[in-house]
Image: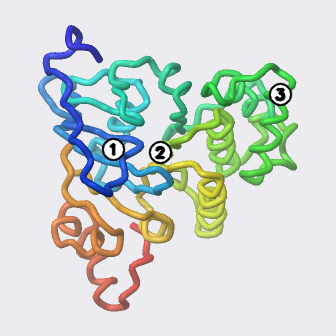
Amino acid sequence: MNESSSPHRPLQADLPLAGEVKPQLELLGVTKRFGGVAAVDGVNLRVGKGEILGIIGPNGAGKTTLLNCISGVFRLDGGDIRWEGASIAGMAPHRVARLGIGRTFQIVRPFGSMTARENAAIGALFGSSDARKGPKEAFEIADQVLELVGLKAKAGRPVAALTIPDRKRLEVARAVATRPHLLLLDEVMAGLNNVEIDEALDMVRTVHATGVTVLLIEHVMRVIVGICDRAIVLESGRVLAEGEPEVVLRDERVIQAYLGERYAKRLRASGDEDGTN
């Protein structure tokens, strides 16, 4: 986003303090409006390299809109987004992907006429500068990521023959095939049963272990507690709370705005912070 396309001048990043690790991704006063409504309202956020950061909050809080801003789907109405120190606000999604930011979508969007292997290869063909290869190498990358997410045995199956959990795995595989340095995951656990959630958790851990930073939106609280280093709570487009997941999920503001009294009673009764909501 340049100055001519935005009513706001991009904010300047603060200089890092002595010994402070420079963030890989930084959001500075990010704002996105639809008509007169601010879906994202002045959000400041830092993500460190190698971190797993969870974003939670009620429906309509601005979570997916925030990912759309980061990935270039939406242009900002204010603020700035910095990737490894340089502004990426206003960049088209394919340019953002080439910088090493991959993402999945809440509603999976596979190419229905292709096999799982062909879908994954698309990511390698049109991904980051590290991923873009010729067809032969793209299929080699596809085979690697399908094995990584547990779909190797179903590589030749058409998308129509895959279950919903497998389609979610494929969505992750296609994003990972872009060779991202940062992976944005939008509710990849939604609609899964407990066994499938455990399998998906293992998949995210495996991807993260390859050196990929992960920023994920999730409503399953045991996912947030189980794999996230930090949690950010959005409410009405603004950051309500952030910190270690166990601390955030006990914050009275978060309980009132999002988790509800039933969740709070379960915490008080059992001390179990790994429940779902």
Residue hosting label 3: 137
Q: Position of residue 28 (x, y in %)?
A: 23, 37
Q: Position of residue 200 (x, y in %)?
A: 62, 59
SS under mark 3: helix
Residue in the picture at 19% in, 26% down: 78
Q: Earlier in the sequence, mark 2 or mark 1?
A: 1
SS under mark 1: helix
How far apart are the two marked residues, 3 and 1, measured between alpha carbons?
35 Å
Above or below, comparing residue 237 to residue 56 in the picture: above
Residue in the picture at 37% in, 53% down: 21
Using the image, tell me which numbered label, if any, was put on residue 186. 2
User: As rendered, which of 126 and 63 lies closer to the eye?
Assistant: 126
User: As rendered, which of 275 and 72 lies closer to the eye?
Assistant: 72
Disc 1 residue type (three-letter): Lys
Above or below, comparing residue 167 to residue 247 in the picture: above
Disc 2 residue type (three-letter): Asp
How far apart are the two marked residues, 3 and 2, measured between alpha carbons?
28 Å
Q: Quadrant of the C terminus?
A: bottom left
Residue in the picture at 73% in, 30% down: 119
Residue 193 appears left or right of 216? right
Q: Name the residue furthest bottom.
A: 269
Disc 3 residue type (three-letter): Glu
How far apart are the two marked residues, 2 and 1, measured between alpha carbons?
9 Å
Q: Nearer the viewer, mark 3 or mark 2?
A: 3
Above or below, comparing residue 44 to residue 70 in the picture: below
Q: Residues within 10 Å of mark 2 (few under 14, many from 20)?
A: many
Q: Earlier in the sequence, mark 3 or mark 1?
A: 1
SS under mark 2: strand
Residue 41 appears left or right of 75? left
Residue hosting label 1: 63
Q: Position of residue 219 (x, y in %)?
A: 41, 58
Above or below, comparing residue 97 to residue 244 in the picture: above
